[in-house]
Structure formats: C-alpha cells, structure tokens
Amino acid sequence: MRVENLKTQESVVESVLFTMGQSVEIRQLAAALESDEETAIQAVERLKEKYDKRKAGMQIVRLDDSYQMCSRVDYYENLIRVAATPKKQILSDVVMETLAIIAYKQPVTKADIEKIRGVKSDHAVNRLVEYDLVYEAGRLDAPGRPALFATTEEFLRRFGVGSTEQLPEMNVEQREEIRSEVEEELNLRIDEEGHLLDDDEDPEEDADENENEKEIENNEAYGEDSIS
C-alpha cells in the first residue's frame, strides 16, 4: 500500500533504518514506501532534520546512495564507558552443576556429562565455553570422535585455585548424602562409585553370593583331591 501521509512516511523510514541496523539503499526505502526515490529521499531527510534539531541520541547519515541510522558521535565517550564495563556473568544452578562435573571429571565428553546429570547439557556446556570457563581439549578416540571438555585458566582465576588438584575433595559424608538424595528423588539405587544398580541387584547379596560360590568351589576342589 502506497504511503502518502508525510508523518507516516517518516515512521516507515525510521522503522526500516532501525530494524536493518546498517546502510539501506534509497531504492529500498522507496520500495518500503511504494514510492519513487525522490519521495523516499524527502522523507528520510525530514526525519534526519528532526533528529538533528533535538540532538537525539541517534542520527541519520547519508552514505552515497544509502542512509543509515547510528549513534550520534557526540555521545561516543559515554558509549565507550558502557562498552568498557565488564559484563557480569551469572551462572545458573544448571551451569554450575555442569561446570562442577567437568572440573572433577575432566577431560569429559558431553555424553558423559548428560549421563551424570540425566538431562541434555548442550546449552550449559555452550554457555561455559562462551564464558571461557571451559574449552574443547581434544577428541575421544571412539566412534564419532566426541569432543572432550576441560576447564580453562580463566576458571582457575575465577575460583581462586592454582590448579584443578587444589579443588576441594568431596568427603565420605557428602558423597553418602548426595547419593541418598539422588536415590530418593529419582527412585534409583546407586553403588558407592555412583553406578546405577538394577532393581534386583543388592551389593550385600552379591557379596554373599560370591562368598558362597567361592566356598562351593573350594569344597569341590577338596572333594576332587580326596577322591584322587
């Protein structure tokens, strides 16, 4: 629909320049207005004049046969202050959990991380890589050659340790508490090494069975010796 209202023309031009974020050719502005190029130029020049008159934070500049909306040069110093401020990185519980697994199990594949967490961890791992806390340390010599992830020097600096060997060890009480919580929450049974047990498996029963089997083997051996 052809735009004929002058104010609406300016609004359309403003919207296009803002959305594109780069220089827009005059012919493209004319296409947006469904008008000739001269009408498009008049519309953008009126808008440019309004921005300049009130010293707006944004300005419109002409580049050959194009126009672009950008920050006004008068405020570059203020923008630099913001750009120079370090971005505070907030690690969610999910990301922290993933980071802990990598820190203690490294180098570790994404598949192994997901086995421990029980859920997909693509987003968490990617976020840690983005924060420079984790990096791809190599490839596992296995089908598909999955990536191995490990912590970076930035991780050591952020957490105040000289090496991963200085990470606090998990004591027996903490390990048992975590294992009990996981078993209760997921209704699963886990051995002391963190491996899942089948419903019909019992570590104590298995140990008893092994002892019984050894005793039977010994008896059979003695029996054979006495016969011979």
Image (cartoon, rainbow, N blue to C red):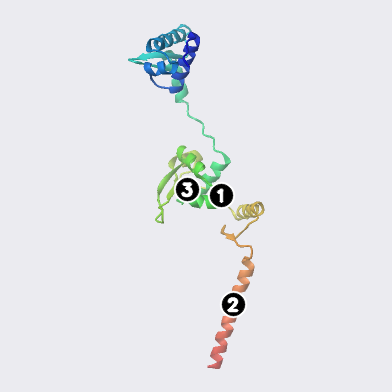
Task: Report the Cα–Cα distance between label 3 and label 1.
Answer: 21 Å
Whether residue 204 is situated above or below residue 22 in the rendered picture: below
Label 1's element? helix
Residue 164, numbered circle:
3
The residue mark sitting in front, 2 or 3, is: 2
- Residue 105: give its label: none
Residue type, label 1: Arg
Q: Which residue is mark 1?
A: 117
**Residue in the foreground of this view, choosing between 12 and 47:** 12
Q: Quadrant of residue 187?
A: bottom right
Q: Position of residue 86 (x, y in %)?
A: 47, 29
Q: Which residue is more in the foreground, 127 or 165?
A: 127
Q: Residues under labels 1 and 2: Cα distance? A: 37 Å
Q: Nearer the viewer, mark 3 or mark 1?
A: 1
Which circle's residue, 2 or 3, is located before the other in the chain?
3
Marks 3 & 1, CB-CB < 8 Å contact: no
Q: Position of residue 182 (x, y in %)?
A: 63, 52
Horizontal side of 158 relative to 36 (left or right) equals: right
Q: Of the residues shown, which amino acid type is indicated by label 2?
A: Glu
Rate crowding at label 2 as few (under 14), some (14 to 19) or many (20 or more) other CA atoms within 10 Å.
few
Residue carrying label 2: 213
Most distant residue in the bottom direction: 228
Sequence order check, earlier mark of 3 and 1? 1
Question: Which image quadrant is residue 142 in?
Answer: bottom left
Q: Pointers 2 and 3 in contact (CB under 8 A)?
A: no
